[in-house]
Amino acid sequence: MRLRKSSIIDFFKSSIVNKSIKVLFIRILGVLLFFGVTIFLTNYFDPELVGKYDFSRSLLIFLGAISVFGMHQSIIYYSGYLASINNRGYLKRIYYKMIFIVFVISGLLYFISQLLRIEFIGEYLNLSLTNTAIKTILALFFYALTMLNIDVFRAINKIYLSEFYRNIFRYIIFFIGVVIIFYTDNLTRLVDVFLLNFVFLALCSSIILLYLFSKTDYKPNTVKITYKDIIKKSAPMAVTATSFFLMQSLDILMLTKFTNYETVAFYASAVKLTMIISIVLASVNIVMGPQIAEFFASGKMNKLKENIKNGTRLIFFITFPLILVLALLSSFALGIFGEEYKAAKFALLILLIGQLINTLCGSVGIYLNMTGKQNIFQIILISALFLNVILNFILIPKIGMIGAAIATSTSMILWNIIAVIYVYKKDRIKIFLTIR
């Protein structure tokens, strides 16, 4: 009994568990805000407007992953590497170069979108962009800069500030905007408010980062990281991030193509409920990422294994009860968004199966990225993405949102299991949940 009690105390005293719980608390507040906004939208805005918002949000997530180009992950890697050589101050120079890369990529994507608006090019490619898509692409740089800044906060050990921006500030500002357009009878401006929110966030977070970096300095002649180095390190992470976010948003984008905005809104409500599960894994990853990079780079494998074990157990202990409750009360949970949203019940149950396997496999993705195995992770996710695309094309026209859920869960299960097997065979580390 003493041994068990001692083990439990040690578990909750570990830095990974302690910090992860604090981050999780902030994320829970963020989820409450997010669902508050979502419930307000689904109850007081027309489903077509909500569908346009969900389409814009999914497109922004996908194109944002391209614009950030994996640098939100590589900045964490560089933070751990620079900490191991006691020169974390150099991070600000890397950050300035990353901003320029984000600007160039976002500008290129906007230029391409303008080309697609030319009539003969659009007809030749059998592709036309809606006004919603054009507005979304125009705001792309500010979204990408916001996402980069949030992870730069994390890289300089401002984890709680990072989570405040990621989960609290971004939803509060958006919610205020939504309330304003509701009471001024400008409901059609919903997408505009959503996108302008990121313009404001990008400016605020950049000002704070510039201030924080002005107080730090680096040791010259100890390290030099060029644009080429950043691109080379970030490119595989960019491919994996783009593939990952595409798998998260492809179902909604494909539903938009094959169904209608109302169906998109119903299905998106099920996806949003599964976010409750995702935040637990993300909260642990937020804390584990820099530590995995640092411990692996310095060869502290025992500490690395212990942190991973504690993190995976924490993920399971919190997420399993949540998955069970959502599965048993699926109709009730969807009914919060409105009676008609219960149509997504079976889609939600299928998505929860994928999330269960995702939590059992722990922080396998962040481990691969932080230990120099980003190329392998890239291959695994691209393979899963191909399966996702094929299943979406086959299943959505036939069974709608059920097909989208099957495609998403199947691809999620596939890449998690393959990645876990690879890590165990390569490093003999058990990323997955273990009893001992």
Image: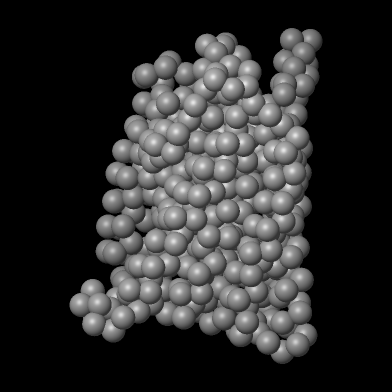
Q: For the N terminus, which image quadrant? A: top right
State the residue in front, 271 or 113.
113
Q: Residue furthest left?
A: 124
Q: Is residue 54 left or right of residue 326?
A: left
Q: Residue furthest front?
A: 221
Q: Is residue 149 above or below residue 332?
A: above
Q: Is residue 178 left or right of residue 376?
A: right
Q: For the C terminus, which image quadrant? A: top right
Q: Is residue 81 above or below residue 96?
A: above
Q: Position of residue 11 (x, y in %)?
A: 71, 21
Q: Position of residue 87 (x, y in %)?
A: 62, 22
Quadrant of residue 110 within the rendered picture: bottom left
Which residue sits at x=58%, y=53%? 145
Q: Position of residue 214 (x, y in %)?
A: 72, 39
- Type of colouring: one colour
Q: Is residue 325 left or right of residue 8?
A: left
Which residue sits at x=33%, y=73%? 115
Q: Position of residue 266 (x, y in %)?
A: 53, 72
Q: Is residue 408 visible?
A: no
Q: Is residue 46 left or right of residue 414?
A: right
Which residue sits at x=66%, y=66%? 197
State the residue in front, 94 or 350.
94
State the residue in front, 335 or 28.
28
Number of dots carrying numbers: 0
Which residue sits at x=53%, y=60%? 141
Q: Residue furthest bottom?
A: 185
State the residue in front, 331 or 363.
363
Q: Is residue 206 visible?
A: yes
